[in-house]
Amino acid sequence: MGTDANVWRVGEVADLTGLSVRTLHYYEEMGLLVPSDRTETGHRRYTEADLARLQQILSLKSIGFSLEEIRDCLNNPDFSPLTVLNLHMDQIRRHIEALMELHKRLETVADHLRQRESVSAQEFIYLMEGIRMAEKYPFTPEQMEKIRKQGELLGQDKIREVEQEWPELIAKVKAEMEKGTPPDSPEVRQLARRWKELIEMFTGGDPGIAATLKKRYTEEPGYAAQFGMSRELLEYVAKAMES
């Protein structure tokens, strides 16, 4: 620990957290984590409050938030540390539930093998689905309940209207991308704003649900592809939203 009991140098923070000094410098450049103190010679010194903020950064990053989204969240006075912890606990709970389900499926197949019974192809498919669930972290029960309530608020007519609009919006964005229109152009930014509005209708503005949805789209190309969205298209829209 540094000279003061509650102050750490950048190298000490790196050792404590397993992060590289370069990563901590990058977080500072982004405005994510700026050390609260410096020595007379200009060396960075991190306080307990800085370490608490770093914990929030790492929690949100593990959930699937981008660094830009994390910065926006932490700079929002209404986004409390408790919110971050609750989001992280939801993510862990989701993982535990998926692992418990996978354990049940593995045990079923193991029982068949112990009794020297044959295992059908369908059972192996069922098992592989469980493995994918454990790896990809589906929505938590709490998130599913929020999504259900949001659907009730919107009503069936609005839901059908949005379902019809999505393919049209995706096609418009794809056309602009294929034409080579810059993502920061007025027309693409307008499409991106509508894209964000439709996502918020589904998520009800819940950042945890939005992060899970984004994670699924980016990490499961096959899932996004069934809606006509390639990785390239998703990156194009993300750039338009950031501009």
Image (spheres, rainbow, N blue to C red):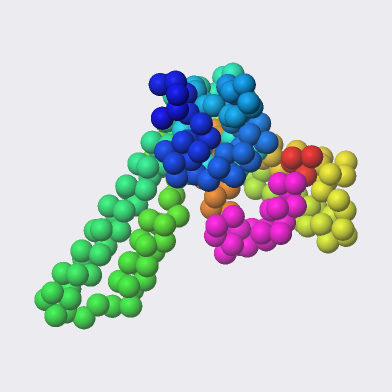
Residue 86, given in percent of the width and then of the height, sits at 42, 30
Query: Of 230 and 66, which appears nearest the observer?
Result: 66
In front: 2, or 169? 2
Residue interval drawn in magenta: 218-239
Q: Could you tell me if residue 218 is visible in this image? A: yes
The foreground one among 60 and 7 is: 7
| Residue 224, x across and y down, in percent | 61, 58
Looking at this rendering, what residue extends furthest in the top direction? 77
- Magenta run includes residue 56: no
Does the magenta-highlighted stretch encompass residue 231? yes
The answer to whether residue 58 is visible is: no
User: Residue 129 falls in which quadrant of the image?
Assistant: bottom left
Q: Taking 124 as reference, is 214 left or right?
A: right
Residue 151 higher or lower than 135, as above or below: above
Q: Would you say the magenta stretch is mainly helix, strand or loop?
A: helix
Q: Residue furthest left?
A: 115
Residue at 32% across, 47% down: 96
Quadrant that contains the C terminus = top right
**Residue shown at 41% from the left, 30% from the top:** 1
| 7 relative position to 182: left or right | left
Q: Please tell me how many numbered marks the rendered image carries.
A: 0
Toward which corner of the image does residue 151 lie, by quadrant? top right
For this orientation, the residue located farthest to the front is: 41
The image position of residue 38, as x and y in percent, is 60, 23
The residue located at (62%, 39%) in the rendering is 25
Tell me the quarter of the picture where residue 220 sits: bottom right
Q: Residue at x 88, y 41 (%)?
A: 186
Compared to residue 202, the image places residue 117 above or below, namely: below
Instruction: Give left or right: position of 219 versus 6.
Output: right
